[in-house]
Amino acid sequence: MQDFGQAFSLAFQLLWTADADLMEIIGLSLRVSLTAMAVSCAIALPVGAALGMSRFRGRGAAIILLNALMGLPPVVVGLCVYLMLSRAGPMGELGLLYTPTAMIIAQSILITPIIAALSRQVIEDLHSEYAEQFRSMCVPVHTAVGALLWDARYSLLTVALAGFGRAVAEVGAVIIVGGNIAHLTRVMTTAIALETSKGDLALALALGMVLLLIALAVNAVVMALRMTATRYAYA
Amino acid sequence: MLDATARYEGGDVAGTQAREEPAVLPCEVRGLCFEAGGDLIIDNVDLTLGSTGITVVMGPNGAGKSILVRLLHGMLEPSAGDISWGGRGLCEETRRRQAMVFQTPVLLRRSVEANIAFALRLHGENGQVRCVRILDEAGLAEKAGQPARLLSGGERQRLAIARALAADPEVLFLDEATASLDPASVQAIEEVVQSARDRSVKIIFITHDIGQARRLADDVVFMHRGRIVERAPAGKFFDNPSSREASDYLAGRIVL
Ligand SMILES: Nc1ncnc2c1ncn2[C@@H]1O[C@H](COP(=O)(O)OP(=O)(O)OP(=O)(O)O)[C@@H](O)[C@H]1O
Ligand SMILES: [Mg+2]
């Protein structure tokens, strides 16, 4: 077991010298989670908009279900994706298990309900504001959806970033479907788990600091978005 | 009574080519009822709106003015009765040729200019030139790039009216469009409304302001408790109202 202070200085050194392994891990983390965020947005924003704009039987139940899915435990998602992708599973043929794609799938499943549920609320609020005016102007549905998504863009970006934050910090799902294979599926969270258990605290600490920095950066961007939105009274 | 097609002879109808479509006016309302929460809010209303001029709708609070106008514009479904525009029911096509300005207008969370552009695009227009001219006429040229929701009450109302007119409607409903505005803004809006009338836009204008009604009205519809109790040309209505309710209202007495 390394000395604690020594671990810290090693960690800073790794960061300062932009250690190749470290950078690879950070790069993969960002790639996987940003892709998962994009995939989730593509699915969740239309779902959120549809739920926020329409009235149908069972809508309440759908919203409750969606809200409940926000709390999906990552390990359960990991397990389900594992079962789907494993050799014996229905999608085993694709050979996706232990690839970045598998991790993207797992993270997408994890954060799609989050983005859908939060964007549903955003869209519903704006829709209740615009609905009467749009009805009066005979605005076609597709134009209305576009206008709502566009005019709510700052809030929706915040929602997307919340999804990203959840994805990048998550470990349970990616470790099951990715396997934490060096140079292939090793991301920040799985590396921290592994290195800590191996006693290599320097790399774990360096990665931990980067994760914190990312969390900070995401929050800073969210704050900046909020301020821009209120300054222009768009929100 | 002038025909609705007359408006296209005026020359200054912005960005329109003569329309082939059948006229939306006159409007005929027969036996109109609207029920909500067990109350009959509109009670067996018959009404004919001619093709031109400003019809002012007056009446005490809760008389049903806003509801009537919403029914005419197709924002609400009547419980009974018929509304026809130019001999046809209230179809999408008819609604598209009407515009409404609500008492508290909802503006898009965009710039002033983008609010107008949105309305223009709905009608298949992309004219930057037209947009600038509309803002100019509304006295909002300097505010073009500003967020619409940061405008003052009067400016918002002017923008809402400009947006409604951008759609080049044949019928324009205004529900207390000048309530809570300063005299200058009221005058500006009255001028816009009158110039629309002069372009043969049919105007239905709800107001509580008797002075304004005198200035604008060609004819008056007076409502009380969901019924039309008086319908008369403006001169007759203000000088010699025939119903007790209307004379009470004009004299500033409580209408019972
Ligand atoms: N959805 C509804 N359910 C029940 N009652 C309603 C509903 N909408 C309106 N009313 C009632 O209908 C009546 C007429 O309302 P309306 O808004 O048309 O009045 P108004 O003549 O426009 O009054 P004001 O001058 O105050 O604007 C009111 O008494 C109102 O309370
Ligand atoms: Mg009203």
Image (cartoon, rainbow, N blue to C red):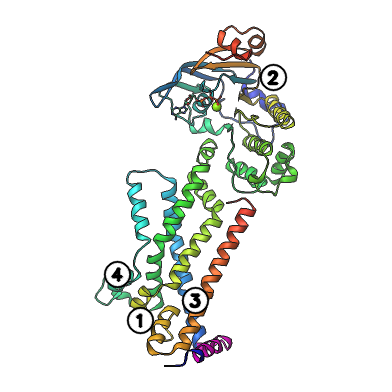
Residue under label 4, please give it: A80
Chain at numbered mark 4: A
Cβ of disc 3 within 8 Å of ligand 1?
no
Residue ID at (56%, 70%): A217
- Report, in whole angstroms, how far the alpha carbon at label 3 lies from the one at label 2: 68 Å
Q: Quadrant of the N terminus of chain A?
A: bottom left
Q: Earlier in the sequence, mark 3 or mark 4?
A: 4
Q: Is residue A209 left or right of residue B205?
A: left
Tell me which secondary structure the magenta stretch mostly adopts: helix
Residue ID at (44%, 48%): A52
Three-letter code, disc 3: Leu
Kindly state the secondary structure of the residue where label 3 is placed.
helix
Q: Magenta stretch?
A: A6-20
Q: Please give the label number shown on residue A211.
A: 3
Q: Are marks 3 and 4 in contact (CB under 8 Å)?
A: no
Residue mark closest to the camera, 4 vs 2? 2
